[in-house]
Image (cartoon, grey):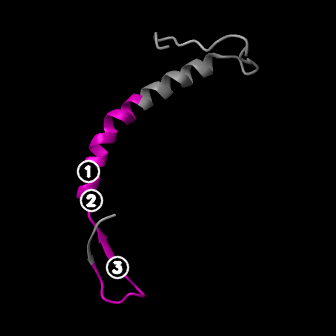
């Protein structure tokens, strides 16, 4: 993490982190976080609707409900 300053003693170095470089990362991550949050919420709904003892049939290919292949 970039720092703005360091204290003189090496044994007890004190650094001040700079938040500005992380703002670009946050801005980039926001739409991805929204996408995955929506996907995982939908998956939770599907999994919650299944009976606890339901096991997938390994002979059947996985199906996507939203048209993805």
Q: Work out whether 58 lies above or below 19.
A: above
Q: Where is residue 52 in the image (x, y as percent from the top left)?
A: 72, 21
Q: Where is residue 48 in the image (x, y as percent from the top left)?
A: 61, 21
* Mark earlier in primary sequence (1, 3): 3
Q: Which residue lies furthest to the right in this view?
A: 53
Image: magenta residue range: 6-35
Q: In which quarter of the image is the N terminus?
A: bottom left
- Element type at mark 1: helix
Residue lying at 61% horizontally and 15% vertically, measured from the top left: 62
Q: Which residue is labeled 2 in the image?
A: 19
* Mark earlier in primary sequence (3, 2): 3
Q: Which labelled disc corresponds to residue 58?
A: none
Measure the C-alpha gap from mark 1 to mark 3: 22 Å
Left/right placement of residue 28 relative to residue 45 reads left
Image marks 2 and 1: residues in contact by CB distance under 8 Å: yes
How many residues crowd around disc 3 within 10 Å: few (fewer than 14), some, or many (20 or more)? few
Measure the C-alpha gap from mark 2 to mark 1: 7 Å
Q: Which labelled disc corresponds to residue 23?
A: 1
Q: Which residue is labeled 3 in the image?
A: 14
């Amino acid at each position: 993490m970039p720092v703005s300053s360091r204290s003189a003693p090496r044994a007890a170095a004190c650094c001040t982190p700079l938040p500005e470089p992380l703002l670009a990362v946050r801005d980039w991550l926001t739409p991805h976080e929204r996408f995955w949050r929506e996907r995982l919420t939908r998956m939770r709904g599907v999994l919650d609707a299944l009976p606890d003892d339901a096991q997938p049939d390994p002979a059947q290919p996985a199906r996507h409900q939203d048209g993805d292949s």
